[in-house]
Image: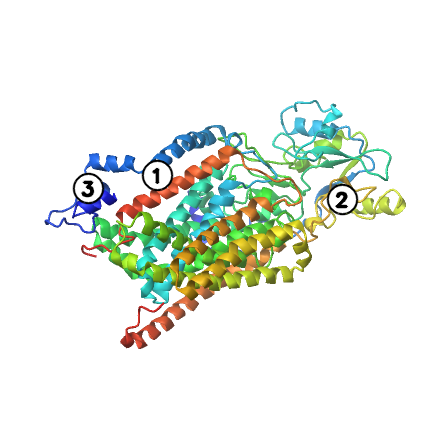
Amino acid sequence: MNNKIINRRNFIKGGFASTIVASQLKVTGVKAAGDFDHYPDSMGVLVDINRCVGCRSCEAACNKEQGLPEPEKPFNDYSVFDEIHHGRMERRTREDRYTVVNKYNVAEIDHPLFRKAQCNHCLEPACLTSCFVKAYSKTPEGAVIYNPDVCVGCRTCMIACPFYVPTFKYSSAFSPRIMKCIFCYDTRLKVGRPPACVEACPQEALIFGKRADLLDIARKRITNNSSKYVNHIYGEKEAGGTAWLYISPVEFSKVGFNTHISQEPIINFVRDFLSMVPMVLMIWPALFAGFHLLANRKDANSRHDNDHQEV
Amino acid sequence: MKLFTINKQELPIVDHFRPDGSKWTLKEKLLLGLTFQDYRKQFFRNPVNWVVIIIFLTGIPIIIERYVYGLASVTHSSNDYPWGLFLGFGLFGMVPLSASGFLLGTTVELFGRKDFHPIERLALLNGLLGYFFAVCFLLVDLGLPWRLPYPMFVSLGPAAVLFLVAWHVATYLSVQIAEVLPSFFEWIGWLKGKKVIRGMVLGLTIAGIILSTLHQGALGALFTYAPGKVHPLWLSANFQWLHFFCSSIFGGLSMVIVVSTLCKKFLAWRCDDHFLVSLDRLTLGLAKGCVFAMITYIAIKFAAIAHDKEWVYLLTGWGQYYLFEISLAVLLPMMLYVLAIRKGNATVARVAAIFAVLGILWNRINTCLVCFNWYMYREIPHWKEVAITITVYTAYIVTYRFILYRLPILYEWKGAK
């Protein structure tokens, strides 16, 4: 109860400059939206699309680690790659799967390519900055985690995520929540262990490490095998940078990546509006009270000619 | 009801007392001065009520289904389209059409245009009910509706746009209740309460302007979180809040024209002469306001295209759809409004208002559903989602009518004020 009162008081100040409150409500260890510093030692995963063979071991490991239900078709059933959903062959994350592998046939390579998709754990996550109950936090280890105890179920995070990652447990009437990859934060990342999917990968297509080191490794692979890779690390700059990074033998757009994502974090598109808010709050009262005085004075002056009928 | 008002001299109720000096009880006021039998008779004679009964009988079980079995039972549970009809129509569509309250409040109370007084209360009520039912739509859509107060008191994320929307809609709803209360106080005869509100009216009006500017804009700004998802023609990071705010001006005014027209046609027994005589003149006055807002809106729509260098999109299929929307939803009603003002013909303005109101709804559904994920498949809402939307909207109409029948909104209270 006491806690609630403090929050309320904080808000009253916030009525005038909500941005100032953002810094006041900062919780240690987890940063609030608004002024987001990147964590220099945060971890990440490098995905090498050249090495992925589409065995789906990562999917199986994920469902097991996160306690997600067994899928209808077992993980060694590869017909899922050819399923068609909404006219596309790609599967997407769902409330019963945090990660999916999709198959892509490209003209320049004689075998299919596979791409694993999951939460990319952005450095400035759109889900976090769009959440009005602070259900999301970015941990110093690099994970974007979610707290179902405060979530209202508005699904703005799903609107905001440029990678279409968060999913909603629509099937639940009484405890619906957002379902998404949390980098195995609770069980592994917190104690320095790699996430379950990385550990399960038999091809070393996934490497776990400090994001800064992974960028070096990725760059080296690209320069040493320039014929095998396109010169781009997906996730280095996309949406302000992500903890998960990808390197690929073909243009990223051919293996299911959205290549139109801006290099700026999503919150930058919203800042224009947010900075306008305190100005309206402070200027409007005086401005419109002034209008009122002017209008009434005019009214007083023209009262004698009794011309209230004119429109 | 019309039959009764012709035959019985004391109806409709406009005073605390009958012509013979006896006092109306609250129960009699609620029954519109009819006996219970007469009230029931007129209720079932009205074909509109039969339609309402059918809609409720179909829709309410589906709403119960939604709360018992979850959103999955009534929607397509789309993770690609998290916001469907409940928000696209109910929140994003109804809120701009409810801007009327703050607009007429500003016109009459702040700018002192007392000539608009006969429709001020209708506009305020239209605002209050629109917001109230937008919140109802939100309660249907939220995954955990019982946590609605969380962003206010439990876990605050003040740097999010939705935080502004939540706080401003909540405070503005209170402001609007305060603005509509005087008519209620007159009706029950508690003048002290009315006097208190009267003293706050300027403050309430200015609060209304601030809150409306911000949350009408904030509803637009919500989409700036999805710069890659909404088609670029329907989204401009810099101008989006202005687009939504500016279109809410003519949306709200046009909605008042539509509602007042319906009142004049179907509720004439409840309107006083003051309202009926001045309505044509006021309709043209509102039409003028609409024209100014529409010109500004079209200008900033194209300013946004120029700013983001998106002219090339106009040559695509989406561009044609965009121009189609602008022409039918804004240009056409604008030209009709101009014609109406030129000819002094309120009927033309009323036709224009219907186009403008539908146009606002169309634009919001375009932004939220049709042009969202424009490079993907289109999401067609589940029929149960449509049924729930119609049911909640019907509840809105029924509540609206219930209040108009009774409170001094369309007529002036003859008793002590």
Q: Residue B113's x, y, as percent? A: 34, 66
Which type of secondary structure does the marked residue at label 2 adopt? helix
Q: Chain of mark 2?
A: A
Front-lying residue, A45 or B228:
B228
Q: CA distance from mark 1 to mark 2?
A: 55 Å
> In the image, what residue occupies the spot 25% across and 57% down?
B273
Q: Residue B370's x, y, as percent? A: 58, 45
Q: What number of labels is visible?
A: 3
Q: Nearer the viewer, mark 2 or mark 3?
A: 3
Q: Which residue is mark 3?
A: B28
Relative placement, left or right, of B14 versus A75 is left
Q: Residue A264's x, y, as percent? A: 68, 53
Farthest-out residue, front? B343
Q: Nearer the viewer, mark 1 or mark 2?
A: 1
Which type of secondary structure does the marked residue at label 1 adopt? helix
Q: Residue B330's x, y, as percent? A: 52, 57
Relative placement, left or right, of B89 versus A305 is right
Circle on res. A253: 2
Q: Chain of mark 3?
A: B
Q: Which residue is mark 1?
A: B48
Circles 2 and 3, Cβ within 8 Å, touching? The answer is no
